[in-house]
Amino acid sequence: MATKPTFSNEVANLLHAAEGNPLETCIQCGTCSGSCPVVKYMDQTPRRIIAMINAGLKDDVLKTNTFWYCASCYQCTVRCPSGIDIAEAMYALKRYTMWKNQYKEGLIGPTFSETFVKTIVRSGRSYEPLLAPTYIFSYGIREFFSEALNATNLMLKGRIPILPPRIKRLENFRRMIAHIIPIGGIE
Amino acid sequence: MSDQFEPVIIGFTCNWCSYRAADMAGTARMKYAPNIRLIRLMCSGRLDPTFVMKAFAGGADGVMITGCHPGDCHYVEQNYKALRRFIILKKTLTQFGIEPGRLKLLWASAAEGAIFTDEVNKFVEQVRELGPLQWPTSGGGLEQMFAVPEHMLVKEVAA
Amino acid sequence: MTEKIGVYVCHCGTNIAGTVDVEGVAKWAAEYLKHRGVVIARDYKFMCSSLGQELIEKDIKELGLTRVVVAACSPHLHEKTFRNACKNAGLNPYLCELVSIREQVSWVHTDKAVATEKSKAIVSGGVERVIWDEPLEPLRVPINPATLVVGGGIAGIQAALEIADAGYHVYMVEREPSIGGHMAQFDKTFPTLDCSACILTPKMVDVGNHKNITLLTWAEVTNVDGYVGNFQATIHQKPRYVNTDLCTGCGICQEKCPKKVIDDVFEAGLGKRKAIYTPFPQAVPNFPVLDKANCTYFLRGTCKACEKFCPTGAIDFTQQDEYIQVDVGQIILATGYDLFDVRRMPQYGYGRLANVFTSLEFERLSNASGPTGGKMVLRDAVTTPTSVAIVHCVGSRDKNYNSYCSSICCMQSLKFAHLVHERTGAEVYNCYIDIRTPAKGYEEFYQRLLEEGTHFIRGKVAEVTNAARVPEEEGKLIVQVEDTLIGKQRRIPVDMVILSAGLEPRHDAKDVARLFGISCSADGWYIERHPKLDPVATMTEGVYIAGVVQGPKDIPASVAQGAAAAARALGKIQQKEVAMEPIRATINQDKCSGCRICNNLCPFNAILFHEDKMVSEVNPALCQGCGTCVAACPAGAISGTVFSNEQILAQLEGLLLLNLKQLELEPVPS
Amino acid sequence: MKEYVYFPGCSLEKIALSYHLSALETTQKLGIKLTELEDWNCCGATAYFHVDELLAYTLVARNLAMAEKVGTEVVAPCSACYKNMYFTKLHLSEDPDLTDHINEALQEDNLSYSGTVAVKHLIEVFANDIGVEELKSKVIYPLNGLKVAAYYGCQILRPKKDHEDVEQPQFFEDLMSAIGATPVDFPLKLTCCGGSLLISSRPAAYSMIYNLLYSAQRAQADVIATACPLCQVNLECYQQQVNQEFGTHFSIPVVYFTQLIGLSMGIPPKKLGFGKEFLSPKKAIDAIKNIHSQEEVITQ
C-alpha cells in the first residue's frame, strides 16, 4: 500500500522511541498548554498544534511560531495523560521545517540553531561571541546595546573566552559528522 | 516473515490460571507469536512427562508447561509436583540429546495475560535460536518408543 | 463403530473472521479430516446464537452425528452453551469439544494466513480429541442454601436483603465496625439530591434486624475451601473488646473515654473519634469497637474508664481473635473501592497547600452530621470560601495513573458545585476534560448547574500553586489550566480546590481475588463471566461480584448489581442441587499394583487403600479431578475422565497434524 | 576515594567558570575525584536536536564512548548536558539499530559505544552518593540565616516520569538545610527559566525570568541557588534588562549550589569563583563573615 502518509504520521515518524502514532491518542485535555510556561507567546497552544496536525492542516501548523517558542522544559511531556512526548513533537516540527526550509518569517530560532550547529561542527565546542550576531541583527538597536553591555560585562568578569575553543581530534570529529549527514546540509 | 525458521511449540496450560491468562491476553487483544498451540489440562499436576516426550517425538520444537503460581494452585499444591517433574524432565531431555532450552516452565495467574504474552514471545525466540529439533528417528528407536499406543491405532482403523 | 463428527467454525461477527479465513478452515476440515470421521464442516456468523445452535442440533438429528467440534471462543465462555445444544439434540453433552480460535488465535495474532493455519491445527486437535470423548453424566451435589456476602456497602446490603427476604440465610462479613460503606459518608446523592443517610440507614437497620442475616462486622474472610454449593469459609472476627450480648449501644463508654483519635477512615481525617467508638451515630451494629492501638489501658495499663462506666459490664479487655467456620453454597463479593491517593499528583498540591481537599473530605465537610456540621469552611475551620475550583479526572483517564474513567466523578463534581453554590454562594469553577452524564436525570442535572451559573472550563488542570504573580492572586490558590474552548491558558485564583479523585480497586483486591479463586483485570477490577451477558457471575461457579468491585459505578448501578447477584444466587438455590463436571479419576483395580504412590499425592485424601485387596480406590465424592495421580501412576492404572491420556495424546497428534501424515501413509477406507 | 569521569560542558569553560571551580573544590574536599573527560565535545544543547536528531545522538555518544574507556560513571554539572547524555543513553539502549549506525560513525574517531557508563548530574552526586549526613559532617561555617531559593530548573528531573519525585523533589532543599541555610518556599523551583529561548525568543525569556525573580523576591530569598549554568546566566546577567522591561528593581544574586556548599566548608570565596558575578552575593558571604568574623577567609 503506497499511500502517502498523513501529516500526523509524518510527524509521528520523526518522534524518537515512539511506537505507532502517539499523536492520534491525544484527548485534547489541555494539560500540555496548561503546564506550558511560554504558551502566551505562542500563536497556537501546543494542544491545538496536535489537533491541527491530526487534522492534516500542515501549512497552518508550519506557519505557527509555537514549536520555535518551546523552551523544552518537558513539563508537558511529564504530565501528558496520553503519554505523548509533546516536547519531542515540537523538536520534530522544528527539524521538519528546517529541512523543508518553510518556517515562519522573522523567526530567530532557526538561524540561531543553524549557527550554533555550524560552530560546533567547526570547532567541536560552542562559542558565545559567534552566536551573538545572529540575533543582534534580528532585534532593535536598544537590544543591541544592552546585549553589548552584557557582553562587555562578561568579558570584564573574564566569563567570555577570547579565542574560540577547539577539540583536539577535530579531523576525526568532522569525518564522524560527515558519516552521519552530508556536511553540505549545514556548512 | 520470509525464510526464517518458525518453530512449532506445544503449550500445556492448567484450567484455572494459565489457560485464563491466555484468555486474558485474548480479551485484552495482546499480541504474541502464533507458533504456540495450547492443550488444556485441569492442573499442571496432570502433566505426564511422556506428553512432553511425545510432543517432541511428534515434531514439536519446543514445549511450554504453564500453571498457577506456587501457593495459588486450585488443587492446593499439585503445581509443585509439576515443578518436580519439570526438573527431572530437563535432565532426561539432555540425556536424549535435546537441548533443555526447548522446555520451559511458566507460572501465570489468571490476571497475568501480559506476562503470558511476553514469556511466549521470549520462548519462541529462544527456540528459534536453537533451530529445528533434530530428533534421531533412524532405526525408529525413539519414535517407536513414543509412538501412539497400540489400542489407539486399532480405533483409527475401525474409523 | 465409525464416529460421525461435525465441525463448526464460528465467525463471531468479525472477531474471528477478521483474522481467520473461517470458510477456509471449515472447507479444510471437511476435506483433510474426512478420514478421521468428519462428515460435515460448517462456518456460521454466530455459532452461540440460537440459530447457530439449531444448526448443530439439526445436523445431529439428520446426519446422526456422534461427535461435535466447535471452533469459536474460550470454553470458559460457551462450553456449556454447545454442550446443551448437543443435549437438546439427544447427544451426550460430553461428546462435544469447544476449541478456542478467538482468544487463542484471532485476538492475539494479526497475520491472516498464519492465523488460519493455526486454527486448522487447533480444529484438527479438537477432532482427534473428540474421538476419545466418552459419554458422561454430570455429578449432582446438593446446594447449601446459605450465602456469604462479603462487604457491607450498599451493593452488599442490597444483595443480602434480597436473599434474606426470599427466606434463605445470609452471612454478611464487613471489615469495618459498621456496615454502610462509602455511601454512609456522603451527604447528598446525585442527581436527585436526596439525603444519603435517609435512604441508606433504613436498609442498614433491616440488615441488622433480619432474622435470616448473621452480621459479622469488624471481621474478614481468611480462607475459602470447597466448590459451588459447598463452600467452607473461615472468618476472622477481630476482638471488639465489647461483649455484644451485653452491650446495649448506649454510648456512655464513648462519652467517658478520655482518648481522642483522628478518624481517618470515616471522617477522612477531618474529624476526631474516641479510642472506643462507633464510626457514626446510625452505625449498624450499634456496638462500639475498642481501638487497641490507641486505647490508654492497652498502652499504659491504666484507665478502663469505659469499663467503669459501662452500665451492663459489656467491656471485656480479655477478648481474643476468633476464627469462625461457616458453610455456604454461594458467595457474593461486594468489597467496593479505595479512593485514588491524590498525593500521587503533587502538582495539585494536596498536603502541601492547606485548602486543597479530596472529594471524600468534601463529602464530610458538606455532611450535616460531619465534623463541621455541614459548614463548608477552609482548613482554618472558620473562613467560608468565596471561590471554589473543582478538578475533575484526578488520577483517572491518565496513563500515568489509571487510564480508565472513574465514571462517577463528573456527577459527583456537579453535585459538589451545586452544594457549594447553594450553601456559600461562592463562585464555582468546574475544570473538566469531558462532562459525562449518561444516566437518567443526569444531563438534566448538568443543565441545572449551567443555569445556576457555575463556570465550566474545558481543560484538565495542569497545576495548583500558591505562586502569585499579581496582587489579586496573593493569598489565593491559583488553578492553572488551558481553557481549551478558547485556546488560552488561564490562572484562576480561588480559596478552595476540590480534587475529584478517581476510584481504585481495594489495595488488597488481588489477594482477595486469589482467596476466592476469581481473577482481576490488569486494572485490578474483578472480571465478570461475560462483559455484557453475564455481568455479575465470575469464572468461578458460585462466586458473584456486585458493585464497584467489578468496575467504577454509581449507587443505582451498584444496587442493581447487588440485586442481580442475589437473583443469580437464588436461582441456583432454587435448583436445590448443582451439576458438577464429572471430571474424576478412577483406578482400574486389575492394573493397580498397590504401590500406593498415588495415595500421598492427593491433597484431598480422595484415594483410599484396600489392605485386603492391596489396591487403591478413588472416592469420587472427594476427588476434584486434578489428575496428578493419573500422571503419576507407574502402572497406568488410573485414568481421568474428560482429560484421559488418550484424549490428551490424541489432541497432541492433531495439533501437530500427525493425523494428516497418516493419511498419506495408509489412507483409511471410509 | 570515589572517582567520576567529569564532563564540564562548554559553559563551564568560561561563562560558568565559577561553577567549574567550585565543583572541583567542593568535591575534592569531600574526598571525590573528578577526572575531566579527555577531548570532550559539545553535547549539542537543545539547538542540535532542532537540526538533526541523529547527529545530536552521535555527539553525545562520542562523549559517552570516551567516558566508557576511563570510568563507570560520568557526571555533568550542566543540566542540559546531563539531560542529553541521560536520555541519549536511554534511547540507544532501546534502539540497537540506532546504536549500530552511530557506532559506525564513531569508528571515524576509533571509538565505539556500548552503554556501560552511568550518567549522573553533579547535584545527584551530592544528594545521593555523598548524602546529607556526610555533607553535614564537613560543614565548618553553617550559613545560618541565609535564605536560599533552591532552584532546580527543568532538565535535572524532566522528562523523567517517576512523578512524585519529578513534581515535588526535596533533595536540593535538603542539601541547603544541610549547610545551615534556610530554603524558602519557592513554588516556581521547577519552572523553566527560558534559557534556550533567550536568543530565539527574547520577550518570552524575559517574562519567564521575571516570574522566577518575582517569586524568589516574594519568598524573601537572599540568594537563588542553581545547578545549571544556563539558569545562572539567565537569571543573573539579564536581571538588568528584565528590570528595564518590567520597571522592577530586582537585585537577587544567583549562585551555584556548589559555591554555597564551598563557603560552608570554609573554602575561600576566590577559589569558589566568587567575584565573577554581576550581582555580588555579599549577603551569602557576609553570612559567614558576621557569624564567624572570617575576614581572612574572605580576603584570602
Image (tube, rainbow, N blue to C red):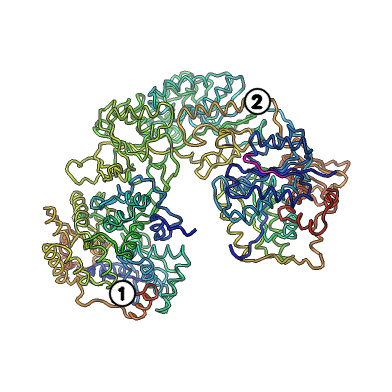
Determine crowd level at label 2: few under 14, some 14-19, many 20+ residues with C-alpha closer than 10 A. Answer: many
Does residue D235 appear anywhere in the picture? yes
Residue at coordinates 44% horizontally, 44% vertically from top-left?
Answer: C402
Whether residue C239 is visible here, answered yes or no, is no
Magenta residues, dominant SS class: strand
**Magenta span contains residue D140:** no
Q: Say whether residue C602 is left or right of residue C274.
A: right
Q: Which span is picked out in magenta?
A: C41-46
Q: Give the answer, above or below, for where A7 lies relative to D52.
A: above
- What is the three-letter code of the residue carrying label 1? Val
Relative image position of residue C565 (x, y in whole percent): 57, 29
User: In the rendered view, would you say A32 is above or below C249?
Assistant: below
* Chain for numbered disc 2: C
User: Where residue C170 sits: x, y (%)?
Assistant: 59, 25
Q: Horizontal placement of A144 versus C64: left or right?
A: left
Image coordinates of residue C379 in percent, x first then y, are 29, 35
